[in-house]
Image (cartoon, rainbow, N blue to C red):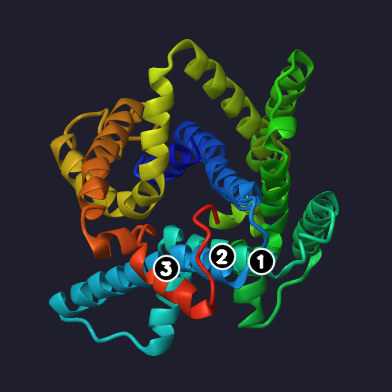
Amino acid sequence: AAIAAVIAIHVIAWAGAEGDEAESWRRTLDALARVGVPAFVLLSGVLFGRSDAPPSRSRGIHRLLRLGAPWLVWSAVFNGLWLSTVLVQGGPLPTVWEIFSANLEGPGYLYFLLLLLQLSALFMALPLHSVSKVRVAAASVAVQGICVAARFAMPDLPEPAQGLLLDHAYEQAPYWVGYFGLGMLAGAHLERTTRFTPIRAGVAIFVAVASGEMLLTSIAEGWNAGRLTGANLFLHPAYVPLTVACCLTVYWLATAGVRMVPRLGRTAAQWAHLGFGVYLVHQYVLALVGPVLQRLTVASPYSVSAPLPASLPALGLLYLLTVAATLPLVRLLLRFRFGRIALGEGRAPIRALAAAAGSRPNRGG
């Protein structure tokens, strides 16, 4: 569900926003879909916390390589395509600073891989085997809250501090550490934290509705607009309760669905296996499918780039086509060793590095 919401963010960006009504629709859909990103970070913490093995050097290498190898591969793809486009168009070659800035401000899937690398490295360094995970999670949420509040209160800074600490705060681990910490705690006590009761369900639904309403109202009224533009919207405080409530609700609904229709469990397992690859590849597919569908529907008032809500059917079609084209491409990549490494599934180099570290890797990490 988190990956599905992330894809929706990128699809919604194709819609036109001419006029107050269209802008309102786009702002609302975009804000709601963005819950998928903090959910993605929280669920990464769940996977981290689910491992029964204590922290070790081999486990750290295994986990960091699963994130670092795809980042290296897809960074090379992004920069290769960008430089090729510059050369084909006859433009001047970019400077080192321009390349750095393009990677810093460029594709979200790359800098969020770096974010997960930061968080994984941080929590691997903590003595979780000897410290209460409840305390670690509480401290993580406190650190995130303090950083977000300080960023709202902080005046503008001279460059490069302004860019790194304020304009690109969404790429820094301290602003996300609470999600990962909560996920780690939930993963360590998954049965207890996800146990369904009618009271818990009612509270989760209430929290989701209330925090979602607070999020949309504050955005419409322009609250702290200067510090909540673009990807920095992820740092809105309302996303914390909204993310937790949505994750619990989706988990309960999915569990109930699998009990009623067991086949859904197999489908969900297949999607989960391919999900990380879909996350990495879908933007390239969208960049190819989007312009084609845009040209095919350009004469229609319901085209992909038409103002919302008229473009909703075309955006839905664009979403389905993107997913339908991405899934077989991911399956194809998984057939090859380099493709598996690019999608974080390469086993041979992981074993080699883990052996160099002196112990066998833990596949659960």
Quadrant of residue 99 in the image? Answer: bottom left
Residue receiving disc 2: 59
Which residue does the numbered mark 1 point to in the structure image? 124
Marking on residue 350:
3
> Is 223 located above or below residue 345 in the figure?
above
The amino acid on which the numbered mark 2 sits, given as a three-letter code, is Arg
| CA neighbours of label 3 inside 10 A, class few (<14), some (14 to 19), many (20+) | many
Q: What element carries label 1?
A: helix
Q: Which residue is drawn at 77% across and 71% down?
A: 155
Q: Residue at x 77, y 60 (%)?
A: 129
**Residue 268 as seen in the image, left or right of residue 51:** left
Q: Which of 145 and 295 is in front in this view?
A: 145
Three-letter amino acid code of the residue under disc 1: Met
Rendering coords of residue 286 (x, y %): 28, 47
Residue type at mark 3? Ile
Is residue 199 shown above or below 312? above
Q: Relative to residue 355, is residue 226 drawn left or right?
A: right
Could you tell which of marks 3 and 2 lies nearer the N-terminus? 2
How far apart in space, not on screen, are marks 1 and 3 (Cα)? 17 Å
Q: In which quarter of the image is residue 312?
A: top left
Q: Are marks 2 and 1 in contact (CB under 8 Å)?
A: yes
Q: Nearer the viewer, residue 74 or 121?
A: 121
Is residue 293 visible in the rendered image? The answer is yes
